Structures are given as structure tokens and as C-alpha cells.
Image (tube, helix red, strand yellow):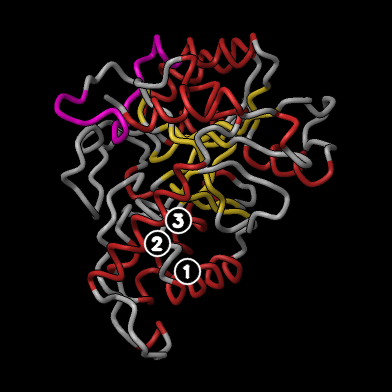
Amino acid sequence: MRWDRWLSVVLVRPWYRRAHERGRVLPVLMYHSISPDPEPGVPPYYRLCTHPVRFAAQMQWLKDHGYCGVTLSEGLTWLQDGLGSSASAAPERPVAITFDDGFQDFYTAAFPVLQRLGFRATMYLATGFIGDQRRNFQPRGASTVPGVVGRPCLTWSEIAELAAAGIEFGAHTVTHPELPRLPWPEIEWEVKESKATLEERLSRPVRSFAHPYAFPAERRDYACHLLDLLGRAGYESAVTTRIGRVRPTTPALMLPRLPLNDADDPCLLEAKLAGAYDWMGKAQAFARLLRHLKSGMFGGHRTPPSARPVPAARQALHE
């Protein structure tokens, strides 16, 4: 049994009421590959693929229930002042739709659905796998993660077409490494070079970043140093794999998202959008904290992170 679904749909959702919300809340959906890959042997929670038929059904469900798919920047603007960043009136129920990595199947399977429904989205690109000719995704970190290695990525000409149609692009590093494993000079290069490449190719500012793999928020030295680096590099927002929805008080450079894949049926999708899945973010953070405490990663040292090697990150994607 998938316990996160059962707890969210059966226990949490029935007593949750929208009246409990205070102020605006923005759901930010996180997708990776839109493909029929069944990912054999991968538990539903960890899957990175969403079948095109399932994705189309999820988007249609949003449309039918009054949601409007927007870019992350549009969603954050609505969250702060409700004005929206497009020429049209601000939607009453925006949901930011994001995609990580830059797979070709976004162009072939996701974009036509978004276009038909009048939705927009944000795509985060690992620029080292984007070329004028087709390249395959070969992440530098956690390369054994199934469902993504070797998958074909977008080309610059496809990206130009998508950008002209209203798709927003953000940076997702160059080589998609596990950043906490790297020394700070390499982290800085990954953060800045991906942004510079995108801005040169798109001829427009790139203000949003997606942290590859799990974001270790419980490691305050790493988190504080990285957020400072992102701010100095010119990023105004950054998304993570932390689970939850975004509120006006959420730090803009450490935004949570709601992971979606082929296992998300309408009941679970509704529960996530309503807030009945937010408890998973707390459980997720607590589990990571326990692992780090057990491994002794919290010591009494106060050495500046830029002056020492970064301990290896032990989190898997989505954890």
C-alpha cells in the first residue's frame, strides 16, 4: 500500500477545509519526464516519469476545476500582490507548473497539452546537456537514478520556440551534480555558468534556479551559504524538492513543490493541491534530520563552508 496516498486522501483530506487557509497559497507542481516509461521496480513515490495520457488528464482536471497553469514567476507575482505578470487578468486559482532537467518529451508530449489548455509553465535546464544538436541526459550526480539517464534533451532551437510561446526557463546547473558533494568554487561555477549560458542563448534575464536532487535545508551552513550565492548571482527565486505549497512568507530562494508523476490519480492530485499532502514535507524534513544526526554530520565546528570540503549528500531525489 502507498501510505502517503492513503494518509493524505483517507485521513487528512476529509477534515481539511479551505477555510483553514489564511491568505494566498500557491501550489507549485514538479514534473520531470512526460513519457510512457513504466520505471519497473521503482516505488510510486520515487518515479520521475508521467505517462502522456496521465499528464493530459491531470492538466484537464486542473482546467475543469478552475485552475490556471502559470509560470513560477507569474505565480509568485500573484502570491505577493495578485496582479499577475501577463497582460491578461490574474487567475483566481493559479498553479505553477514546473519541469526539471529539460527533456525532449516536454516539447513533444507536454507542451501541446499546455498550449491547448492555455497553460504556461517553467522549465529548468541543465545546460550541459542542451546543444544545437540533440544530446542525452548524463547527470554528474546520482547517475544510477532510473528513468532519466540517457534520455534525450531539448535543443536550443526547440527552446527558442518554447520561449516565444510563453514557456519560462530557469537554470538547473550545468552538469546536474549533487551540489553538497562539491567544493564551493565548483558550486559557484555550476550556479553562475548555467545562468550565463541561458541568458546568452535566450537574450533575456534568467532569475530562477532549481536545486538538483534533494535540498538539505537541515544543513544550515550549506543552505545559508548557497542562498547567499544564489542572491549574489542574481536569482530571485529557487525551487527545491522539499514538499509543500508556497505562501507569501516562504523564502523565495527555498521554495517547496508538490511532486507529481504517473501514480498521481485525481484523488491524490486534489489532496496535494488542497494542502492535504503538506504533512509529507514535515515528515520528509524530520527523516532527513534524523539521518544526519545519526551520521554525525552536525558537529560543533564553525569553519566557513567556503574554506572546507562539503560532506557528501545522502539524500535521494524527492527525499
The amino acid pointed to by label 3 is: Ser
Q: Which residue is mark 3?
A: 194
The amino acid marked with disc number 1 is: Ala
Label 3 to label 2: alpha-carbon separation: 21 Å
Task: Evaluate if marks 1 and 2 touch, with contact meaning CB atoms under 8 Å apart.
Answer: yes
Q: Residue at x 24, y 55 (%)?
A: 141
Give the number of callouts.
3
- Mark 1 vs mark 2, CA separation in Å: 7 Å
Magenta stretch: includes residue 48: yes
Q: Nearer the viewer, residue 302 or 295?
A: 295
Closest to the camera, between mark 3 and mark 2, is 2
Instruction: Name the residue carrying label 2.
Output: 216
Q: Which residue is mark 1?
A: 223
- Determine the secondary structure under disc 1: helix
Above-or-below relation of 121 to 171: above
Question: Seen in the image, is 318 located left or right of residue 72?
Answer: left
Q: Amino acid at mark 2?
A: Pro
Q: Earlier in the sequence, mark 3 or mark 2?
A: 3
Residue sitting at 34 percent across and 78 percent down? 298
Residue 49 visible to an observer of this rendering: yes
Q: Position of residue 25 (x, y in %)?
A: 69, 39
Q: Secondary structure at mark 3?
A: helix
Reading the chain from its start, which is encountered first: label 1 or label 2?
2
Using the image as rendered, state which of residue 167 and residue 250 is in the foreground.
Answer: 250
Label 2: element kind: loop
Residue 161 in sight here = no
Residue 59 relative to residue 129: left or right: right
Q: Is residue 31 magenta?
A: no
Which of these two is toward me, 152 or 155? 152
Give the class, few, some or many, for how many residues have Cα within 10 Å of label 3's Cα (few <14, many ≥20).
Answer: many
Q: Is residue 161 left or right of residue 250?
A: left
Query: Bounds of the magenta span?
Result: 39-55
